[in-house]
Image (spheres, rainbow, N blue to C red):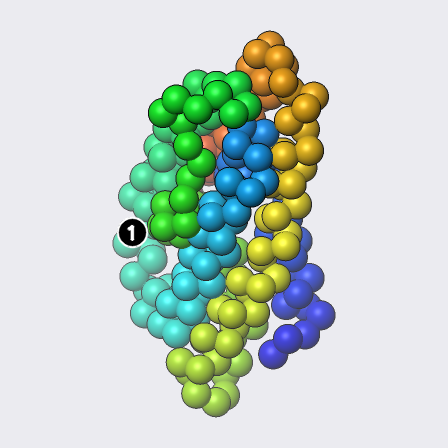
Amino acid sequence: MLDLALMSYVGVMSITPGPNNLMLAASGVNFGFRRTVPHMLGISSGHAFQVAVVAAALAFILNWLTAIRVPLAIAGCIYLLWLSWQIWRAGEPGAGGNAKPMGLFGAAAFQWLNPKAWVMVINTAILFMPSHGNLLSNAVLLALLCGLINLPCIGVWALAGDRMRHWLATARGLRLFNGTMAALMAGTAVWLMVDELMLVL
């Protein structure tokens, strides 16, 4: 099952910009790499669990997804807009206060609202789930492989954010960075919402 096509697909989808990676870069800047690790682990474990569920129940999910796709996409986009606002309001690196990085469970749960994660997971299940053998064990193996490929790819974003901290130590520099990350995420949310609504209109 661990072939070059799977590694390439999951690697490219994991490392390219998206809501998870924008949040990780912002968390790396605002909280450092070490405090961002639970967020990274939450994304990878949430991704792996989502792959397992979707791959194991592919036929059911594809029929059911049509009915819930738009509400799920809208909920995910609204959540992305809220996260954009939170990034915009983030303080200086190490400033403490009420700000804290996203944790493992929050990041894992977010995968179910992340439109990019749904596209990635459904395509992975369709393209790489073996049609022979035990359905459950194949789904679990595929999920573990996806999680293992995903983690170092998303770690690049958290590490990049951490390395940028010393350049963004001023309130102005950090405000500019957080504003840019927030605008990119808000733009992603609006684009995804418009894209979903165009499909049903």
Q: What element carries label 1?
A: helix
Q: Is residue 137 above or below residue 19?
A: below
Q: Is residue 21 visible?
A: no
Q: Where is residue 23 in the image (x, y as percent from the top left)?
A: 51, 36
Q: Which amino acid does label 1 sit on?
A: Ile
Residue at x-position 35% and y-position 32%: 78
Residue in front for this viewpoint, 102 or 134: 102
Residue in front for this viewpoint, 194 or 2: 2
The answer to whether 129 appears left or right of 9 in the picture is: left
The answer to whether 142 appears left or right of 134 in the picture is: right
The N terminus lies in quadrant: bottom right
The answer to whether 90 appears left or right of 57 in the picture is: right
Q: Is residue 195 above or below residue 49?
A: above
* Residue ID for mark 1: 68
The C terminus lies in quadrant: top left
Please state the total of marks drawn on the protein image.
Answer: 1
In the picture, residue 64 is in which quadrant? bottom left
Q: Can residue 169 be seen in this view?
A: yes
Residue at x-position 36% and y-position 35%: 79
Residue in front for this viewpoint, 125 or 145: 145
Residue at x-position 47% and y-position 48%: 38
Q: In this view, does 59 lie above or below 178?
A: below
The residue sitting at the bottom extreme is 133
Q: Where is residue 170 in the image (x, y as percent from the top left)?
A: 62, 13
Q: Position of residue 176 (x, y in %)?
A: 59, 15
Residue at x-position 52% and y-position 25%: 94
